[in-house]
């Protein structure tokens, strides 16, 4: 029954066109890893921390934003406007998406699967994305910004 349901979903996605398909980084581990690593190394993104207990990262982020470490720790992927945990996006995830510290979602801003407890310089308050309607609007915007297809989600950011 589960296989039949998945087959029907795939057929419906194909019928609706590219905008409803999963972003490629959610399906391609190598591309996702390259995009995430580029976001970690990029001076204008600095995704992190690798270890959530890394106080140096949070102090660095607070200094960048001109605020306290406590405030910086509240600006995480889990409440970012680009963090997608909609039902359609959760179907794109490869497996378990939750751990004791948070959950996995998709970052539309930087094209990789990110963890809700982490952050980056480009955090935008107002999230997460929790509905398929809003998720699809981000997918459409990403297509419109990049022109044909999903180029942004097909290339490595770095």
Image: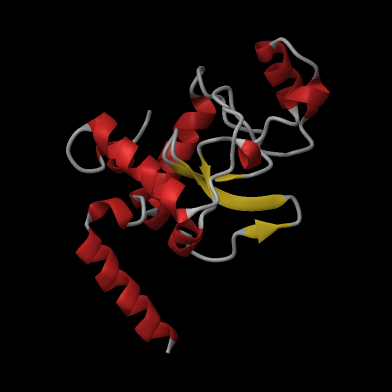
The single residue placed furthest to the front in the displayed view is: 133
Q: Residue at x 45, y 43 (%)?
A: 112
Side of 122 where 50 appears, left or right? right
Q: Position of residue 66 (x, y in %)?
A: 71, 10
Q: Position of residue 64 (x, y in %)?
A: 66, 12
Front residue of 75/135: it is 135
Give the colouring mode of the picture. secondary structure
Q: Residue at x 52, y 24 (%)?
A: 45
Which part of the image, by quadrant, shows the N terminus?
bottom left
Q: Residue at x 37, y 77 (%)?
A: 6
Side of 31 where 11 appears, left or right? left
The single residue placed furthest to the left in the displayed view is: 148
Q: Position of residue 85 (x, y in %)?
A: 54, 52
Instruction: Report the number of discs.
Output: 0
**Quadrant housing residue 12:** bottom left
Side of 54 where 150 appears, left or right? left
**7 lies above or below 87:** below
The single residue placed furthest to the bottom in the displayed view is: 1
**72 lies above or below 138:** above
Which part of the image, by quadrant, shows the C terminus?
top left
Q: Position of residue 105 (x, y in %)?
A: 54, 49
Front residue of 144/69: it is 144
């Amino acid at each position: 029954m589960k296989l039949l349901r998945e087959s029907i979903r795939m057929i419906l996605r194909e019928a609706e066109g590219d905008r409803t398909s999963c972003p490629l980084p959610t399906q391609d581990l190598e591309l996702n890893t390259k995009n995430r690593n580029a976001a970690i190394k990029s001076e204008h993104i600095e995704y992190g921390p690798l270890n959530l207990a890394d106080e140096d990262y949070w102090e660095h982020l607070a200094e960048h934003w001109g605020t306290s470490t406590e405030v910086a720790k509240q600006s995480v992927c889990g409440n970012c406007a680009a963090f997608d945990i909609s039902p359609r996006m959760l179907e794109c995830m490869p497996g378990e998406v939750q751990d004791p510290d948070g959950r996995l979602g998709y970052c539309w801003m930087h094209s990789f699967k990110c963890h809700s407890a982490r952050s980056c310089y480009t955090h935008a308050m107002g999230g997460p994305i929790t509905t398929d309607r809003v998720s699809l609007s981000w997918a459409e915007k990403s297509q419109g910004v990049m022109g044909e297809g999903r180029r942004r989600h097909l290339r490595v950011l770095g």
